[in-house]
Amino acid sequence: MHELSIAMSIVEMAQEEAEERGGVQISAVHLKLGALVGVVKEALFSSYEMACQDTPLSGSRLVIEDSPVVVFCPQCQAQRALSSLQLFYCAECGTPTSEIVQGREIEVTALEIQEWAHNPV
Amino acid sequence: MGSQPRLIEVRKNVLKQNDMTARALRDQFRAAGVFVVSLVSSPGSGKTMFLEKTLTRLRQSYRVAALVGDLATENDAIRLARSQAPVKQITTGTLCHLEAAMVQHALEGWDLHNLDFLFIENVGNLVCPSSYDLGEDLRLVLISVTEGEDKPLKYPTIFNSADVAVVTKMDLASAVEFDWHSTHSNIQAVRPGMTVFKLSAKTGDGMDEYLSFLAAHLARLREPGAI
């Protein structure tokens, strides 16, 4: 269950960002999650909820964007999609490759903040 | 008065803290000239026996030490102490994997210059340790013949993150009708080109080849001009 420690890092990061911006209210955190990170999404969602408790992020949403594995194919000399996680072969030509270009990242990409209109009509 | 959501771009690596600590550890290992191997496996694959034999054999020619991660108990450290090598237990409590900061903390007060090899045994788990860099030079994934040939396909993430695979308990291979070719090709499917050793830590069969492989890595690390 390393999802909880990951969720806690996410909340901590978002909180720091919010403070740097003068204590804005965060309504959602956007996360890019690589398929090779080994994180279970459902577990991360519930861990996120737990990690948010008693913090200014309480009640905020976690939005996950899946990041599929992209490999470099030595045969095609190009970045290619992977056949499957069980087959590290180029999806185009079938050449085996271990050179991973994308899929290992876990990144907070954006924060949704609430902006209050100062001059309501 | 109403509110509207606004999206601000951030782009921050969630594992940044761990990655930074791992980088600092790697620099420290490099400066000391110690070759660091981390071990990952399922619980019960024979990781401690494998490490005990590795330490005992290497100790004849090298200065070796080990850190062992476990949720609770110091049993592994006690078992490994039989190898006469310095061993320290890292008890993770409820955490299912080691993080770079735990390794850093455990190494406080150790003079790494007095070592040739350092082994880091991770918590028995084939999922969580995969995304945590510990500053190691080599990540070794261990499976035993009793675990089933399709293990690499079930845990592609950890196998893909490893540098070398070892299949152990080969002395039980025929009793469990273990299929070496199928295991080997499953490993190659999730990590093309990975070096795979088959051995029995208990009987010692196949250990020589694997130990020579480690010795060759150390020699390469010590070559003048090697980074």
Image: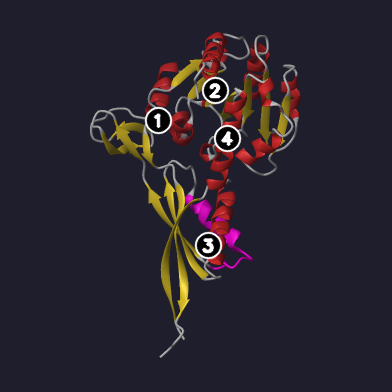
Q: Amino acid at mark 2?
A: Thr
* Subunit that carries the residue with mark 3: A
Q: Amino acid at mark 3?
A: Glu
Residue sticking out furthest to the bottom: A121
**What residue did someone put label 4 on?**
B134
Q: Earlier in the sequence, mark 4 or mark 2?
A: 4
Is the Cβ of the residue at disc 1 closer than 8 Å to that at disc 3?
Answer: no
Pointers 1 and 2 within a single chain: yes
Query: Circle 1 sits in a helix, a strand or a loop, which is it?
Result: helix
Mark 4 surroundings: few (<14), some (14-19) or many (≥20) residues within 10 A: many
Where residue B1 sits: x, y (%)?
A: 46, 86
* Subunit that carries the residue with mark 2: B
**What residue did someone put label 2 on?**
B146
Is the Cβ of the residue at disc 3 closer than 8 Å to that at disc 2?
Answer: no
Query: Circle 2 sits in a helix, a strand or a loop, which is it?
Result: helix
Query: Circle 3 sits in a helix, a strand or a loop, which is it?
Result: helix
Mark toward the viewer: 4 or 3: 3
- What secondary structure is the stretch in magenta mostly built from? helix
Q: Quadrant of residue B72?
A: top right
Q: Is residue B169 magenta?
A: no
Q: Is residue A46 magenta?
A: yes
Mark toward the viewer: 4 or 2: 4
Where residue B168 sits: x, y (%)?
A: 55, 18
* Subunit that carries the residue with mark 4: B
**What residue did someone put label 1 on?**
B190
Q: Amino acid at mark 1?
A: Val
